[in-house]
Amino acid sequence: MPEKKTITEKEVKKAPKKSPVVAEEVVLADEDLEGDEVVFEKTPETADFSGEYLKAVGRRKTSAAQVRLFKNGKGVIIVNGKKASQYFPGEMINILTQPLKASGHIRDLNFSIIVRGGGVSGQVEAVRHGISRALFAFDEALKEQLKANGWLTRDRRAKERKKPGLKGARKRPQWSKR
């Protein structure tokens, strides 16, 4: 029986560009590995997302975030397949984790988030709204705390549409007397 070799995602990303990658399978072009079976091993961050979860949706401007809350986690937040700190650089991660810090569940739960539409600031606030709603579904005793900070209420402000005959939403062409 051929010997099994396991590789991690980091090793796959470091692989030279010449080695072909097909779908979710890793194909190695080395002659010395012929006949060996290659097993793809997931990193711990992505392996924790299994089992039951609570679902919530958060919105802001034109952004929408689908949030999945997994109980008994380690505090991992994955946004569109990346760690939250990679997807939202700088101080934006602090905005995202505000509801978790206020509720004290920063290290207890895992979150898997898909966010689409809008810009970075709208996406961050949509994710924060979704996390708040998921926490409320997880523990209804947190409602007062989340509501007091305004995280359960959707911020409906969005760009106003352009009207016909106008230059923008409200700006009019210059009026001339003659």
Image: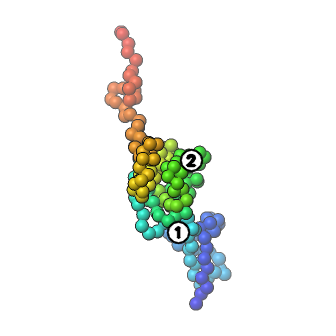
Q: Nearer the viewer, mark 2 or mark 1?
A: 2
Using the image, tell me which numbered label, if any, was put on residue 47. 1
Residue highlighted by disc 2: 94
Q: Residue at x 62, y 66 (%)?
A: 10
**Location of residue 166 with respect to 27 vertically, above or below:** above
Considering every residue shown, the one lying at the far bottom of the view is 1
Colour scheme: rainbow
Is residue 62 at least partly visible in the picture? no
* SS at circle 2: helix
Q: Is residue 157 left or right of residue 108?
A: left
**Location of residue 158 with respect to 64 vertically, above or below:** above
* SS at circle 1: helix
- Quadrant holding the C terminus: top left
Tell me the crowding category of disc 1: few under 14, some 14 to 19, or many 20 or more residues within 10 angstroms, Cα based.
few
Q: Amino acid at mark 1?
A: Ala
Q: Position of residue 151 (x, y in %)?
A: 44, 45
Cα separation, mark 2 vs mark 1, equals 25 Å
Tell me how many marks there are: 2
Q: Residue at x 42, y 58 (%)?
A: 138
Of the pair 63 and 12, the residue shown nearer to us = 63
- Quadrant holding the N terminus: bottom right
Q: Residue at x 54, y 56 (%)?
A: 106
Q: Residue at x 53, y 46 (%)?
A: 95
